[in-house]
Image (cartoon, grey):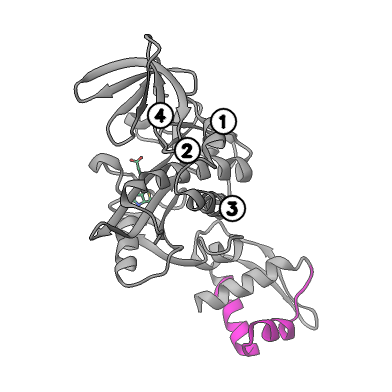
């Protein structure tokens, strides 16, 4: 039923005028009763679909839901996010995507939830996931890459979020290396990539992305660290449009990455939005800390840091933490 709903929505979206029941039946290869049942179900989910005798159906308004039919009928991609699985509530979309991967789900499958009760952040932290406001989605990929190249996928998602947000919301986020997407010095997004490796070969990767879209209230400890698109733009956004723009950008970027298995084709664009570029950064290493000037990423996604003596070091994301000198960024 969800797939039929996606197809009906897609057909209605493509038509500004009325689409006759007859045409819908033919396009989808289903009966009039089936069309009617699906239309009724969509109306029950908040879609305003006008039904006029002898003319057909017309989509008037759509609710801000992030369901499978809504995403599948909006995203304009070839394979990323084409197979969407939605649950109103789940523990964590990353855990769920891993389960789907173990069950054989294809590359490009997207697990989405309206709310997570055990949203997971990096370094074992919790990712607060209230319902109705944000995006919580995890993309399952089965790329033919070496396990050690997987961290670059996180950078690619960071870049895609920045590009998608720019396209869908007209805001211009920057990236704090390696993958914090930031507006006004505060995070709008978190990305958690996890992988399964079998005998040194990549089995699958799950890329979990949380984007603060319409949230306007944050707990006190996050006030100076987190913000949302709504807070920055002063208006609400349809989450599906933001998610679709991010997924479309991700598909384009991933295909560029897969040609060379490095970031050489994306480096320039990444450095363009990199907030740390030519800024002083403090590199916190296990053995101590050093201060230098960030000169952008190299083709491996490492941050090039120039130290006062003139020597440049490539810093790997997994090994260090970078702090701007005077603010969170
Ligand atoms: C971070 O700590 O910055 C990473 C946060 C990642 C959150 C997302 S929300 C969707 C997916 N499911 C999870 O449990 N985590 C990721």
Q: Is residue 31 magenta?
A: yes
For marks 4 and 3, give the CA distance: 31 Å
- Count residues near mark 1 (Cα–Cα under 10 Å), then give few for <14, some for 14-19, many for 20+: few
The residue labelled by disc 2 is: 216
The residue labelled by disc 1 is: 272
For marks 2 and 1, give the CA distance: 29 Å
The residue labelled by disc 4 is: 303
The residue labelled by disc 3 is: 241
Corner quadrant of residue 15: bottom right
Cβ(mark 1) to ligand 1 < 8 Å?
no
Q: Residue at x 68, y 72 (%)?
A: 11
Q: Nearer the viewer, mark 2 or mark 3?
A: 3
* Mark 2 or mark 4, earlier in chain: 2
For marks 1 and 3, give the CA distance: 24 Å
- Count residues near mark 2 (Cα–Cα under 10 Å), then give few for <14, some for 14-19, many for 20+: some
- Count residues near mark 4 (Cα–Cα under 10 Å), then give few for <14, some for 14-19, many for 20+: many
């Amino acid at each position: 039923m969800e797939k039929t709903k996606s197809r009906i929505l897609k057909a209605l979206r493509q038509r500004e005028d009325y689409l006759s029941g007859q045409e819908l039946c033919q396009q989808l290869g289903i009966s009039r009763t089936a069309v009617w049942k699906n239309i009724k179900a969509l109306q029950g989910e908040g879609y305003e679909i006008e039904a006029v005798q002898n003319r057909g159906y017309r989509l008037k308004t759509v609710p801000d839901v992030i369901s499978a039919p809504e995403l599948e009928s909006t995203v304009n991609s070839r394979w990323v996010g084409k197979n969407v699985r939605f649950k109103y509530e789940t523990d964590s979309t990353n855990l769920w995507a891993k389960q789907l991967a173990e069950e054989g789900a294809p590359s490009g499958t997207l697990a989405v939830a309206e709310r997570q009760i055990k949203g997971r952040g990096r370094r074992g932290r919790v990712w607060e996931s209230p319902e109705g406001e944000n995006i919580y989605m995890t993309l399952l990929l089965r790329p033919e890459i070496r396990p050690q190249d997987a961290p670059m996928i996180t950078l690619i998602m960071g870049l895609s979020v920045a590009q998608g947000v720019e396209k869908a919301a007209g805001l211009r986020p920057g990236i704090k290396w390696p993958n914090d997407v930031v507006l006004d010095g505060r995070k709008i997004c978190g990305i958690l990539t996890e992988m399964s490796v079998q005998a040194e070969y990549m089995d699958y990767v799950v890329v979990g992305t949380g984007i603060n879209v319409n949230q306007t209230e944050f707990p006190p400890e996050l006030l100076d660290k987190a913000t949302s698109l709504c807070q920055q733009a002063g208006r609400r956004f349809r989450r599906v449009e933001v998610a679709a723009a991010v997924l479309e950008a991700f598909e384009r970027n991933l295909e560029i990455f897969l040609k060379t298995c490095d970031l050489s084709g994306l480096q320039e664009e990444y450095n363009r939005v990199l907030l740390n570029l030519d800024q002083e950064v403090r590199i916190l290493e296990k053995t101590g800390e050093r201060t230098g000037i960030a000169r952008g990423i190299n083709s491996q996604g490492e941050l090039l840091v120039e130290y006062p003596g003139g020597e440049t070091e490539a810093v790997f994301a997994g090994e260090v933490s970078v702090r701007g000198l005077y603010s969170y960024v």
